[in-house]
Amino acid sequence: MTHNIKYDAGYANGICWASNGQLVAAYQNFEDRGSAGILIKGDQIRSRVEAYEHIVWNTFLYPNPASKELKILSVDASRPISIYDMLGREMLKGYTDSKGKLLMDISSLSRGIYFVMLDHYGKILPIGKVAVIR
């Protein structure tokens, strides 16, 4: 049987920690309130940001919309970046330099919306869309 009980660690009669610092169990006695005690097993949840999210959120495309050149600035240096049309065809490809910069000549592209993708060691990351105008 599972009950939703609010647990206050400040009232714990005993706490057991693993050698890595993770909570194994906590015991609280409710006898003074006329009920049985409880035993709680804890699982530690850590928050983290994937490296991929860091790359995507720190890659910038400008100007957008663009007509002749597209500037790309990324934290992922020396990586290939491709521009795809709406049908998934690769239209242009370039490489960021050692500082993560790339200047792409997009004057050959037709007017429209294009997907910009970065290849991070085989993991293709969508880093944005660019509107090409004339």
Image: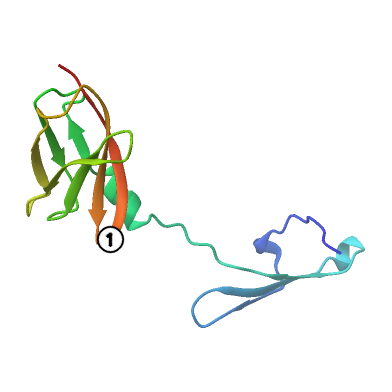
> Is 68 positioned to the left or the right of 46 in the image?
left
Q: Label 1: which residue?
A: 122
Q: Residue at x 11, y 29 (%)?
A: 108
Q: Residue at x 19, y 47 (%)?
A: 81
Question: Does residue 54 sit above or below 42 in this rendering?
Answer: above
Amino acid carrying label 1: it is: Gly
> Is 36 positioned to the left or the right of 59 in the image?
right
Question: Does residue 15 sit above or below 90 in this rendering?
Answer: below
Instruction: Please state the horizontal and vertical placement of residue 13, each as a whole percent of the image.
Output: 72, 72
Instruction: Please state the horizontal and vertical placement of residue 130, each as a whole percent of the image.
Output: 24, 30
As helix, strand or loop, the secondary structure at mark 1 comes to loop
Q: Residue at x 92, y 63 (%)?
A: 34
> Is 61 positioned to the left or the right of 39 in the image?
left
- For the N terminus, the quadrant is bottom right
In the picture, residue 41 is in which quadrant?
bottom right
In the picture, residue 18 is in which quadrant?
bottom right
- The residue furthest top is 134
Instruction: Please state the horizontal and vertical placement of residue 5, each as a whole percent of the image.
Output: 78, 56
Question: Does residue 13 sit above or below 47 in this rendering?
Answer: below
Residue closest to the eye, 86 or 6: 86
Q: How is the image coloured?
A: rainbow
- For the C terminus, the quadrant is top left
Residue closest to the eye, 53 or 93: 93
Around disc 1, counting alpha carbons within 10 Å, would you say few (fewer than 14), some (14 to 19), or many (20 or more)?
few
- The residue furthest right is 34
In the picture, residue 119 is in which quadrant?
bottom left
Q: Residue at x 16, y 26 (%)?
A: 63
Q: Tell me how many marks there are.
A: 1
Instruction: Please state the horizontal and vertical placement of residue 100, each as a whole percent of the image.
Output: 12, 49
